[in-house]
Amino acid sequence: MSSLLQASDITQEDKVVWLEDPAELDYVRQALDKTPRRRGKPRYYRDGRMVGFAELCDTAEADPDSGLQKRRVFYLLPHDRDAEPDGLYRAGAPGEAVDPRTIEPRQVGMKTERSQQGSAAARTTA
């Protein structure tokens, strides 16, 4: 599924669960995955690591075509800024990247100076 989300994609979210401290991360990638359950840690099929996920409310309806739940997953790839601070995303960030401090249930998350330019850049302009 697309990783560029709309607010209408996540209206059934109840809670965001972090597996890592989001305060330590400049950005996270977010994607909408189909999973068999509303709650609990979903299976993860990408390279890199899952750093968080959304859980859905008890009344969340499954996708009528697949019978699966659409849930947000937050992740980082091996070449992202947290693992390679001087690498590809030293400045800038992937299109699906948002500042984890702006993520709440039913809120897509926003790009910020920190997510786009890095924590060092945010400190020098603050």
Image (cartoon, helix red, strand yellow):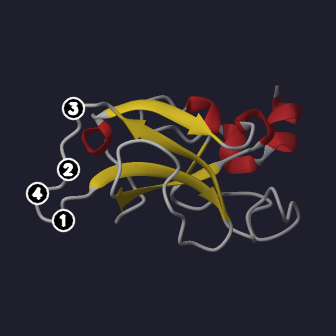
Return the disc, 3 or 1, that comes first in the chain's sequence. Answer: 3
How far apart are the two marked residues, 3 and 2, measured between alpha carbons? Answer: 9 Å
Q: Is residue 122 left or right of residue 95?
A: right
Q: Residue at x 63, y 31 (%)?
A: 101
Q: Nearer the viewer, residue 7 or 126?
A: 7
Q: What residue is pinned by disc 1? A: 66
What amino acid is found at the position of numbered circle 2 in the picture?
Ala
Crowding near the residue tagged with mark 3, few <14, some 14–19, many ≥20 C-alpha atoms within 10 Å: few
Quick one: label 4, few (<14), some, or many (20+) residues within 10 Å?
few
Q: Quadrant of the N terminus?
A: bottom left
Q: CA distance from mark 3 to mark 1?
A: 17 Å
Q: What is the x, y in percent for residue 76?
A: 66, 60
Mark 4 vs 3: CB contact within 8 A: no
Secondary structure state at the residue bearing disc 2: loop
Q: CA distance from mark 1 to mark 2?
A: 8 Å
Relative to 18, is 88 above or below? below
Q: CA distance from mark 4 to mark 3?
A: 14 Å
Label 3, on which residue? 59
Q: CA distance from mark 2 to mark 4?
A: 6 Å
- Asked which secondary structure carries label 4, the reply is loop
Which amino acid, by three-letter code, is at mark 1? Ser
- Mark 1 vs 2: CB contact within 8 A: yes
Q: Which residue is mark 4?
A: 64
Among the 4 quarters of the image, the one containing residue 26? top right
* Labels 2 and 4 touching (C-beta < 8 A): yes
Q: Can you identify the residue that label 2 sits on? A: 62
Q: Amino acid at mark 4?
A: Pro
